[in-house]
């Protein structure tokens, strides 16, 4: 398989809930007005805690410094696994499960923090730019690695990497087993033709920017067992949306599409306390057992917590699996 | 003819050019998300100086106090003339011309300041709430006056008015003749089905909120002889748009409509210095000679200047008329 290091230098930021008003202007520009910005990688995810915005440096320029904006200090690079036809895996699973053993686990072993962003189209594995040498060295046995620069794609040669390469320490360490939350919402992972984005603009704006405003004649539905989670991304011209079925019914059914099987997904939210960005192996802890059972999973990291989405029919076995994990001695 | 005092208590505000970013959130709500607000009267006009926002008290609540927001101190009430079939006027002219002699001139004589807002559908004459008694007394000879309250419409009886009525002083006074500017843009006055507003949302958002942002691959067109002027209003469910032909081509032609004759309009901007809100007779100065010549005119007051729109074929005679006016001794 091929691994591509994509030509985006990303920042991971968070806008606090009551600060969104101040960022409506740049965010609407980044979402809807493609000819007014050079931003090519944009992702916005609402969670109960905040809005996580991951975007390239052109997009980041649009966000004015503010007390409401937190910015993770690193530049992150997105990696993308491309199946080149002769993949050895016989797995039918999609999402992060496919790369659990080949990418996620080896990087965790090398203590490389990853920030995952699954979309309708693919799964982006974000790593810190400073970890790139370790990443290449770790993954080059399994993958042919290409680096995209300015539209050109060239193979990364090992000798380039080995100069100055320092392997991260490999001392044994305790993995924290984080508590998980399993909300009752059912989610769908969808896409739409980017040319039809204007047709859903007012609905999308309403959902993204006004979901906390009271609505005429309706009481806000506050189901304690559900979670507020909505993710929009526009990456290299591709749109991906993750929303629960309550949000989905607000959009015109003829414009959004999901995979032909139209499956629904349940969420496993990882972390009782905000996870931070330095701990390694969080994705691995979840994705490894899913891979062992060949259960598909999307995985979306946000500023505070991680979120895995698994097929609704698998949620009970996943819950049992995670429960068992918690009862095992940490290794 | 009937004169209706509409059931809206309006505020006249101005957002400075670089403050628009801070007000994008409430303004998009007021324009596009009708079920999230009780605001029934909303108008936004961009001029080179600022954004004039006229809105009812429900809408005004959405605007947070800010150094970028100026608010005129009064509550304004919109008046509306309704032809009831047996109108005596034989004029074919539309807009403010129709009401120049019956409303504008008498109010100017009584020193009542007016703020005009012509739309595709009608012409609103805004007067200060504190002037209402004078307004009723002044116009009751010519009109049957109705007041709309909570959806009910009842005739205003003279005796109610005469109690406590004090006529404004009628001393002779010098009328300032303001300089005018005649930009080269051609304007159109348009409407659309409010249900199709979502279909033009991204274009309208782009024009209203991002017209000063640089656009990929294009240089901003800076024609010194043209003026930046764009007006949007959503009043009692009716949409009206005033834009120049350069903005018009950005909208889908099948959704916006104008009158069957599809006429274009030229602008006369009144005022070399900001006009303020206290001077009376400015609208009268322009509309009277237009009425004498039976030339149609829309009239849009903004926070700083007044703007009359006249048919393009009449712009030369209007220019000559105004030039002559400047040469007459002020009376």
Image: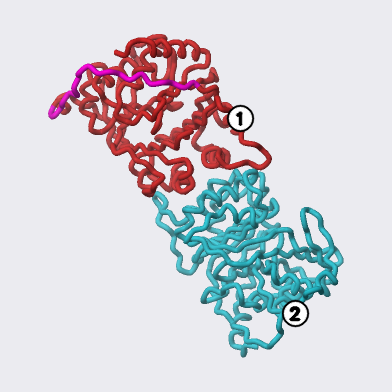
Chain colours: A cyan, B red
Magenta stretch, overall SS:
loop
Name which residue lies at 65% across and 43% down. Answer: A35
Host chain of mark 1 = B
Instruction: State which quadrant residue A267 falls in.
Output: bottom right
Is B167 included in the stretch rendered in magenta?
yes
Q: x%, y% of residue B55? A: 37, 38
- Above or below, A292 against B168 in this view is below
Element type where label 1 sits in the image: loop
Nearer the observer: mark 1 or 2; the answer is: 2
Along the horizontal axis of the image, is B22 left or right of A294?
Answer: left
Stretch in magenta: B163-182
Residue hosting label 1: B249
- Above or below, A15 against B94 in this view is below
- Above or below, B18 against A76 in this view is above
- B141 or B26, nearer to the observer: B26
Host chain of mark 2 = A
Determine which of the numbered discs, if any, sits on residue A167 in the image. Answer: 2
- A88 or B292, nearer to the observer: B292
Name which residue lies at 74% across and 60% down. Answer: A6
Q: x%, y% of residue B217? A: 68, 40
Work out how far the residue at label 1 is from the one at label 2, CA to CA, in angstroms: 59 Å
- Above or below, B63 against A278 in this view is above
Name which residue lies at 48% across and 60% down. Answer: A68
- A137 or B104, nearer to the observer: A137
Name which residue lies at 47% across and 22% down. Answer: B181
């Amino acid at each position: 398989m091929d691994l591509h290091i994509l030509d985006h230098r990303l920042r991971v930021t968070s806008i606090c809930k009551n600060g969104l008003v101040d960022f409506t202007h740049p965010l609407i520009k980044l979402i809807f007005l493609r000819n007014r910005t050079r931003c090519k990688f944009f992702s916005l995810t609402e969670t109960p805690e905040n809005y996580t915005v991951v975007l390239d440096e052109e997009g980041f320029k649009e966000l004015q410094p503010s007390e409401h904006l937190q910015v993770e200090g690193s530049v992150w690079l997105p990696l993308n696994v491309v199946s080149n036809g002769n993949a050895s895996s016989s797995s039918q699973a999609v999402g992060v499960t496919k790369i659990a053993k080949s990418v996620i686990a080896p990087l965790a072993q090398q203590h490389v923090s990853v920030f995952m962003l699954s979309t309708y189209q693919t799964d982006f594995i974000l790593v810190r730019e400073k970890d790139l040498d370790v990443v290449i060295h770790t993954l080059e046995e399994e993958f042919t690695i290409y680096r995209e620069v300015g539209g050109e794609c060239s193979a990364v040669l090992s000798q380039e990497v080995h100069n100055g390469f320092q392997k991260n320490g490999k001392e044994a360490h305790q993995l924290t087993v984080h508590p998980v939350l399993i909300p009752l919402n059912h989610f769908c992972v969808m896409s739409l033709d980017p040319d039809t984005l204007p047709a859903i603009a007012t609905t999308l704006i309403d959902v993204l920017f006004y979901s906390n405003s009271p609505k005429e004649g309706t009481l806000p539905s506050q189901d304690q067992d559900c979670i507020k989670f909505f993710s929009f991304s526009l990456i290299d011209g591709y749109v991906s949306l993750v929303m629960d079925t309550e949000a989905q019914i607000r959009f015109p059914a003829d414009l959004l599409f999901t995979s032909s099987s139209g499956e629904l997904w349940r969420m496993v939210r990882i972390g009782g306390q905000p996870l931070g960005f330095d701990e390694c192996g969080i994705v691995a802890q979840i994705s490894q057992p899913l891979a062992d059972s060949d259960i598909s999973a999307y995985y979306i990291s946000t500023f505070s917590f991680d979120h895995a989405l698994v097929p609704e029919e698998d949620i009970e076995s996943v819950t049992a699996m995670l429960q068992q994990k918690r009862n095992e001695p940490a290794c």
